[in-house]
Image (cartoon, rainbow, N blue to C red):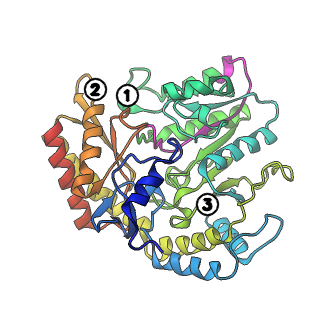
Amino acid sequence: MFENVNPKDLDEGRKYLMSGSVGGGLPIIVDSGKGAVIKDTTGKEYIDCTSQAWTYNIGVSHPRVIEAVQEQISKITHVRTSFETVPKLLLLKKLGELAPKNLKKISFCLHGSVANESAMKLAITNNPDGMVFLTPFEGYSGRTLATIAASWPYHPLNRLFSAYMGNVVRIPNAYCYRCPFGLEYPKCGIMCAEYVKTMIERGVEPVTAIIIEPMQASGGMIPPPPEYLKRIREICNEFGILLIFDEIQTGFGRLGAMFASELYDVYPDILTFGKAIAGGFPLAGVMQRDDLKPPEPASDSFTFAHFPVSFAAAIATLDVIQEEGLIEKAVKMGAYFTGRLKELQEKYETIGDIRGPGLMIGIELVKDRKTKQPANDVCHNIVKEAVSHGVIFGESKFKGLGNVLKIKPPLVISEAQAYRVLEVFEMLLKKYS
């Protein structure tokens, strides 16, 4: 269908693109892909350290997923939420068995932002006396009108929506490299968590829930110290506040565990998932404690929430993660990357901090290690030029506003591919430092 396309037709189509939801920031027209590699329409290959928005944990176009999808498409592609299908029930069974602790009640939608908004509505349903949500500095929970308040509110673009942001209050995040209190771990006594308790005790508005990424992703690849999430859980228990984990990026093996909740041994009341669950097909959702009150009928329902094609893809994806040992591979390849990066850190002053775990790697670039002045320009230049060398890196926050370079490839990446990624990184780091 798309062979021998006239380039003029593509240019004509490009003229009608509205910026915002989908952009053209990288000079690549993606044509195909396999494993950790995507290929453009000229045949050039790129090792993709973004997993296409962190969705391809099992690799691009995995044959098990393609087979499952083709079989389902031949039957039916869309079913109203009022009906059941075999893929929906089998996926619920599989997810229910994998879900952490007692998070055994599950709903679906197609986008992570919508899943987080659903989680917020669910929290309100179960804690109707609350008035605000707490979420950390550097947090990211989506771009719907409800969730954008919990996503980088200091950015000028978000000020357009400030009138609708009164439902979220920011709390200090567990950012040990740039402690908001100027303290050092572990002498700090986890002040970032203790301050949350103070805010709740002395705040005016009652709190509905704390919504938090177990490892902050878009805001800078920031893992908390071991005690932080445990203390937040204790505080929520003390004050009768619900705890929501946004695991849309951390779920399904990315950190070297099926869920970050299991890695940190801290369990929320509500957990959101998405991105990597369906091998590149759209799917997200919410897991809740089985003793919580569910949403009222029709209060949280979406036309395409029952998408049997994505359900079939998700079943195949979860099978691949388990049968191919991809969680163990994430641990192994994460150790390879961070080990090599620490060697580079000894050579280059620009590398301020290296963060993991697993294949959720952030490299914080600085102009001076003592002052920790962010090297945003170095980060952006490396990301921009690496494309011409066949490597796609990610960067924190909006384009050009972050100084953390992200390496989050499919979990199937090979050691040879990882070596090439680091080779390109060092070459460009040397050039721009």
Q: Which span is picked out in magenta?
A: 200-220
The local crowd at label 1, few if under 14, some if 14 to 19, many if 20 or more residues have their Cα within 10 Å, is few
Query: Residue 230: x percent and y percent?
Result: 56, 41
**Horizontal relation, residue 340 to residue 3: left or right:** left
> 97 or 67: which is nearer to us?
67
Which residue is under mark 2? 372
Q: Is residue 212 magenta?
A: yes
Q: Is residue 243 shown above or below 173?
A: below
Q: CA distance from mark 3 to mark 2?
A: 39 Å
Q: Which amino acid type is marked by label 1?
A: Arg
**Horizontal relation, residue 222 to residue 206: left or right:** left
**Horizontal relation, residue 224 to residue 294: left or right:** left
Q: Residue at x 64, y 50 (%)?
A: 271
> 243 or 62: which is nearer to us?
62
- Specify which label sits upstream in the sequence, 1 or 3: 1
Which residue is under mark 1? 178
**Decide: marks 1, 3 in contact (CB < 8 A)?**
no
**Decide: marks 1, 2 in contact (CB < 8 A)?**
yes
Tell me the number on the disc at residue 283.
Answer: 3
